[in-house]
């Protein structure tokens, strides 16, 4: 067999665009040294990456770095969807970072470079066809965030958040790598499809205790990335200590990356009979604990963080149907995987809108404050408050937040198709629990204000909030489009 592999540069174009954006931002900051130009280059690079990913994805599936039938890079509809969403989330976070960068305490060049590097990891992640590419891409998405979380240099909470995030992520990565090494020891393969085929064809390998340990380690390590209970404790402190735009990126792009990585190994590599019960348990614990603890929160970002934990449970719920034999038929599995991806896409749009609203209602270099600080915000800033309320209602799964409503309907439908009615009931009960704190925040926005606003929201933040809100509304009228692309 020839060791020289043909390279499909068209398939790699989205990755080239994302990595090129990071390099160009670094050069522009070095040579031009103007904050506005640096941010503009990063924004144009993110938009170009999204456009390139969509164009390559529209041309059909492309593979490269292949050995026989096994490929390390598989660009299909789902990879294109993930890359487009990651790039647009990066663009949105750049927009809501305007006040933070203009405040002068955050270096624009380093900030934009690190965001572009994280975007590169997210773009590559969706196309990863083997465990090495997958884990390297996931770490490329995560590593820049260690620095970004600690950018509030004068804040003790920021330093604690950065250290917490770093330590937990290193442990999670180590656990995942150990599981991947054990899987290689058992099967002799790293390509996801080859791993899945080998384990499906060999009962003797599936029954090995080493295989069970390997699967458990990989799932546990990736569960850290999505902040699934009981691997969630880092998320609230990290989100609350990070700058608000960075917290938004953690809650959207980083979580989407973790979901994509977990879905890739569950769908293509690991035996469903082993992962199904584990994922069902994780889903129940995650959504229940997240909602119950969110009820007690008084700080805005911590409430959104615990809400994000609960939402991770809803994302994992369709995969819990794999615990039953009826949920492992071809149609049921396809529906579960598509529902998980679609829910993640709906969620990150609404979550970005919620964080953009918090940024608009808080001082440029401040934290998220308390819920009491939001009292009457919708009366002082009707458009911003209205968009925030709509995002909260969407996260709760109520109309007119159609994106959130259809997301939950999609999850429940996939569970019923997999004959996991009991898990669908748990999702419904938790959705009712979530109403309590989402509606409480929305009511606070429209309560009688305690004082007069002392600042006006930045224009770039308002624009980003408006675009995210409109996107969430539009996608709510065409949920099947996301499901169709996610199923490819």
Image (spheres, rainbow, N blue to C red):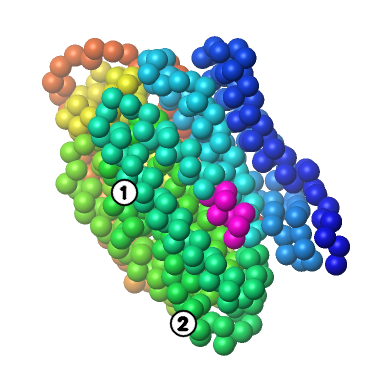
Q: Nearer the viewer, residue 224 or 290?
A: 224
Q: Is residue 190 above or below residue 439?
A: below
Left or right for 287, reference 19: left
Left or right for 172, reference 154: right
Q: CA distance from mark 1 to mark 2?
A: 30 Å
Q: Where residue 76 appears, x then y in whole percent?
A: 68, 52
The kind of secondary structure element at disc 1 is: helix
Q: Nearer the viewer, residue 170 or 336?
A: 170
Q: Is residue 109 above or below residue 263?
A: above
Q: Circle 1 sits on which residue? A: 234
The range drawn in magenta is 131-138
The image quarter containing residue 330 is bottom right
**Which SS type dominates the magenta stretch?**
helix
Whichever of callouts 1 and 2 sits on the residue coming sooner in the sequence is 2
Q: Where residue 349 appears, x then y in whole percent?
A: 46, 39
Q: Quadrant of the N terminus?
A: bottom right
Q: Circle 2 sits on which residue? A: 209
Seen at 48% across and 38% down, the residue is 144
- Residue 387 visible somewhere in the drawing: no
Q: Nearer the viewer, residue 76 or 214?
A: 214
Seen at 42% across and 39% down, the residue is 146
Question: Given contact means CB atoms under 8 Å apart, are the residues at marks 1 and 2 in contact?
Answer: no
Left or right for 196, reference 290: right
The kind of secondary structure element at disc 2 is: helix
Left or right for 408, reference 20: left
Does 136 lie within the magenta span? Answer: yes
Classify mark 2: residues with Cα within 10 Å, few (<14), some (14-19) or many (20+): few
Q: Where residue 433 appears, x then y in whole percent?
A: 24, 54
- Residue 365 visible somewhere in the drawing: yes
The image quarter containing residue 430 is bottom left
């Amino acid at each position: 067999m020839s060791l020289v592999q043909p390279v499909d540069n068209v398939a790699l174009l989205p990755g080239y665009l994302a990595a090129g954006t990071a390099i160009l931002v670094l050069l522009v900051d070095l040579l031009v040294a103007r904050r506005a130009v640096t941010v503009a280059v990063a924004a144009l690079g993110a938009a170009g990456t999204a456009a390139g990913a969509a164009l390559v994805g529209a041309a059909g599936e492309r593979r490269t770095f292949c050995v026989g039938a096994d490929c390390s890079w598989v660009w299909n509809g789902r990879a294109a969807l993930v890359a487009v969403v990651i790039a647009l989330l990066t663009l949105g976070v750049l927009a809501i970072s305007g006040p933070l960068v203009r405040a002068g305490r955050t270096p624009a060049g380093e900030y934009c470079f690190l965001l572009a590097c994280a975007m590169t990891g997210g773009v590559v992640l969706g196309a990863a066809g083997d465990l090495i590419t997958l884990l390297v891409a996931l770490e490329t998405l995560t590593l820049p965030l260690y620095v970004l979380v600690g950018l509030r240099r004068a804040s003790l909470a920021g330093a604690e958040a950065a250290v917490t995030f770093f330590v937990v992520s290193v442990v999670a990565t180590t656990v995942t790598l150990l599981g991947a090494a054990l899987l290689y020891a058992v099967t002799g393969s790293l390509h996801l499809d080859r791993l899945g085929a080998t384990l499906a064809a060999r009962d003797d390998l599936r029954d090995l205790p080493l295989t069970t340990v390997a699967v458990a380690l990989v799932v546990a390590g990736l569960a850290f990335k999505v902040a699934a209970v009981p691997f969630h404790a880092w998320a609230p402190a990290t989100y609350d200590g990070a700058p608000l735009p960075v917290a938004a990126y953690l809650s959207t792009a980083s979580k989407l990356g973790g979901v994509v990585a977990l879905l890739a190994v569950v769908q293509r590599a690991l035996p469903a009979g082993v992962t199904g019960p584990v994922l069902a348990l994780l889903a129940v614990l995650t959504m229940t604990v997240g909602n119950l603890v969110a009820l007690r929160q008084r700080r805005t970002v911590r409430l959104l963080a615990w809400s994000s934990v609960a939402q991770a449970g809803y994302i994992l719920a369709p995969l819990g149907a794999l615990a039953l034999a009826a949920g492992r038929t071809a149609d049921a599995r396809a529906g579960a995987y598509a529902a998980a991806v679609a829910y993640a896409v709906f969620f990150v749009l609404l979550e970005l809108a919620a964080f953009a609203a918090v940024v608009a209602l808080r001082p440029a270099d401040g934290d998220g404050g308390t819920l009491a600080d939001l009292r009457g915000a919708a009366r002082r800033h009707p458009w911003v408050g209205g968009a925030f309320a709509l995002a909260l209602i969407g996260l709760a799964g109520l109309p007119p937040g159609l994106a959130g409503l259809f997301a939950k309907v999609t999850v429940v439908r996939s569970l019923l198709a997999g004959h996991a009615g009991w898990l669908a009931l748990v999702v419904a009960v938790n959705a009712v629990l979530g109403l309590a704190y989402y509606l409480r925040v929305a009511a606070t926005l429209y309560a009688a204000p305690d004082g007069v606003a002392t600042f006006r929201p930045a224009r770039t933040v308002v624009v980003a909030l408006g675009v995210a809100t409109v996107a969430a509304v539009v996608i709510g009228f065409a949920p099947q489009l996301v499901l169709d692309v996610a199923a490819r």
